[in-house]
Image (spheres, rainbow, N blue to C red):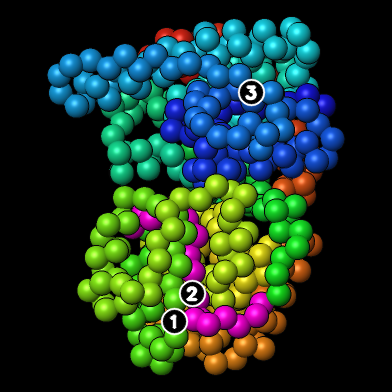
Amino acid sequence: MRIAYVCGDPGIPVLGDKGAAVHVRELIRGFATVGHRVALFAARTGHGDRDDLVAEVYRVGLDERGVPGRPQDVVREREWSCVMQHDAWMASLAAEHARSPFDLVYERYSLWTRAGAAFARRHRLPYVVEVNSPLRDEQQRYRSLAWTLRAERVERLVYAAATAVVAVSEGVARHVRAHTNTPDRVHVVENGVDLALYAAAPACERRRPFTVGFLGSLKPWHGVDVLIAAAARVREQVPALGVRIVGDGPERASLERMAHEFGIGDVVEFTGSVPKREVPAQLASMDVATAPYPRLDGFYFSPLKVYDYLASGRPIVASRVGHLPHLLRHGETALLVAPGDVDDLARALVRLWRSPSFAGSLGRAARADAVALHGWDARARRILGLATEPLVGVTTQAIRKDALSWHVE
């Protein structure tokens, strides 16, 4: 099977180290592992090792012209330039289809790209849409969204056109079902992990100092501040303590200040962002890997970091939030703690320090779960099983450049 993978989000440099970019490449590798060819059409390629991407890559350029004036004017211009790329996306897909026909269109949902839906409908191909978050709501809440009505119309149209919608968590699936007239086409397919990276996962051996770690972007909703506060309390009982924070982001400076204010600046290491191939070695240097999420309303994440933790065989301490209690079995593959509870997190970390044998048993069980259940090849097979036949619910004419008249028939 030949798959056209569409990633129209200009915020995802598909060759970069950003989590979303890693997700794109690893799912494509999953498709390749189970015997299929992929052509990736991306709004942004970024800089990175193309050898890490087992696909042909075609960049569909964005015309971010920008205009002088109020910030909102610039936002509108940037969003409209994304909308106006429809013909370029269609032409790029059509050229490759003419050279070697596609059997499936797979799209990572973005705010404005509707070419995947139109192309699949025009050529009567199965069309699968992957949704990773309530993107429109996030854009309004955390950034800026000028064309709110147009964004909603794109969202509803894309969902309606899909043979299947793949949501990475039940929280995301609930959001999609609330915005489509075809909720029966929405399926939960969680994220996965590249097991080949962890083919030789090291044993859990006690280190000195006892090193507690975190992997991911440094943003407020990841709870790294909770980890630093808990580490300060752990140090009262564990003098030889280390904290390794692997990743970067807008909160780094404030987290560094916080570590010094808590008196543990000398034991907290910020590595910055690292390439994906270096992540296994970083995790191997940790005695415990943490996902210390705070209490969040409507937690919908399917954190890639936790799947990496499982595959690495590290003992895990994670917040009891969202779908994590479904993914992690308390006392068997991880310790689950109350979200945002510094004391609860500190107690769990001290427990693992005091009982290396228990920590080792958690790590081994976590690794076994990853190998048995969470490889990207398994995810790829599940997704392809949902792509059975094209649907005819949306006309080609309905998916046109004039955003004011988009409609579902």
Residue 270 horizontal/vertical position (percent): 40, 61
Extent of the magenta region: 204-220
Contact, mark 2 vs mark 1 (Cβ under 8 Å): yes
Residue 12 visible here? yes
Residue 409 visible here? no
Observer-side mark, 2 or 1, equals 1
Dot 1 falls on a residue whose secondary structure is strand
Whether residue 213 appears in magenta in the rendering, the answer is yes
Mark 1 is on which residue type? Leu
Residue 310 horizontal/vertical position (percent): 65, 65
Residue nearest the observer in this picture, 243 or 128: 243
Residue 37 horizontal/vertical position (percent): 78, 28
Mark 3 is on which residue type? Val
Q: Quadrant of residue 152?
A: top left
Residue at the spot of label 2? 212
Dot 3 falls on a residue whose secondary structure is strand
Residue nearest the observer in this picture, 153 or 307: 307
Between discs 2 and 1, the one toward the N terminus: 2
Mark 2 is on which residue type? Val
Q: Which mark is residue 57?
A: 3
Residue 269 horizontal/vertical position (percent): 40, 66
Q: Which mark is residue 241?
A: 1
Alpha-carbon distance for marks 2 and 1? 8 Å
Quadrant assignment for the N terminus: top right
Dot 2 falls on a residue whose secondary structure is strand
Residue found farthest to the right: 35
Q: Quadrant of residue 346?
A: bottom left
Q: Looking at the picture, does residue 167 appear above or below residue 287?
A: above
Left or right: 279, with 247 as reference point: right
